[in-house]
């Protein structure tokens, strides 16, 4: 049941991102959210169909978002967190045992983490490492000094 709820939520988020991406592209903004919406929506559909590849596809969506975010804003913590924090939290929630267990036909056995969930976990770790690194960067620092002369 929790897998189906997660799948529906992913599908709705994907549709929202897709629609918002179309609107953003129409007013001259980035078309990235169209791609992200498609990836998240298809990931939700795959999870609904009990296909573990949905986890890997979500990992791809997270990795593509990280790369795009770094290209767009660099290591600016606040700008990066606005683009990826929710996606990372959802990725962590997708790895909880009840969801992973329900991706297999016989859900009575313990959760079987495989390649797809491993890939998602790896992308979450990469995003977290980039986020921690970005916390210690100051991309808006303007170096300068005051002169000893006083203004009249």
Image (cartoon, rainbow, N blue to C red):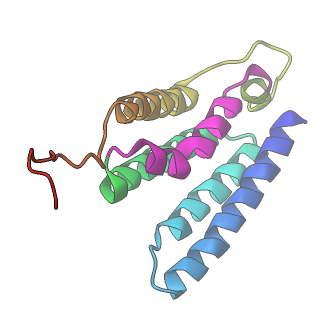
Magenta residues, dominant SS class: helix
Indicate yes or no whether the magenta region holds residue 71: no
Q: Position of residue 17 (x, y in %)?
A: 64, 65
Q: Position of residue 55 (x, y in %)?
A: 61, 38
Indicate yes or no whether the magenta region holds residue 96: yes
- 77 relative to 27, above or below: above
Specify whether 72 is left or right of 32: left
- 74 relative to 94, above or below: below
The stretch in magenta equals 75-98
Q: Split into 4 quadrants, where in the image is the C terminus?
A: bottom left
- 2 relative to 33, above or below: above
Q: Position of residue 117 (x, y in %)?
A: 58, 28
Q: Give the residue displayed 46% in from the left and 78% down from the top.
A: 29
Residue placed farthest to the right in the image?
1
- 15 relative to 73, above or below: below
Q: Give the residue displayed 72% in from the left and 27% down from the top.
A: 100
Specify whether 54 is left or right of 75: right
Q: Give the residue displayed 76% in from the left and 12% down from the top.
A: 110
């Amino acid at each position: 049941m929790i897998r189906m709820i997660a799948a529906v939520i992913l599908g709705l988020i994907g549709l929202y991102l897709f629609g918002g991406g179309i609107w953003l592209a129409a007013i001259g903004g980035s078309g990235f959210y169209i791609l992200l919406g498609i990836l998240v929506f298809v990931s939700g559909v795959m999870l609904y169909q009990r296909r573990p590849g949905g986890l890997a596809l979500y990992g791809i969506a997270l990795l593509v978002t990280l790369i795009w975010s770094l290209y767009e804003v660099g290591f600016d913590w606040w700008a990066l967190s606005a683009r990826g924090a929710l996606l990372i939290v959802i990725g962590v929630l997708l790895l909880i045992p009840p969801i992973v267990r329900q991706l297999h036909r016989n859900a009575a056995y313990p959760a079987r983490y495989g390649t797809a969930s491993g890939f998602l976990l790896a992308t979450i770790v990469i995003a977290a490492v980039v986020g921690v690194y970005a916390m210690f960067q100051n991309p808006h620092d303007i170096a300068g000094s005051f002169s000893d002369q006083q203004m009249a």
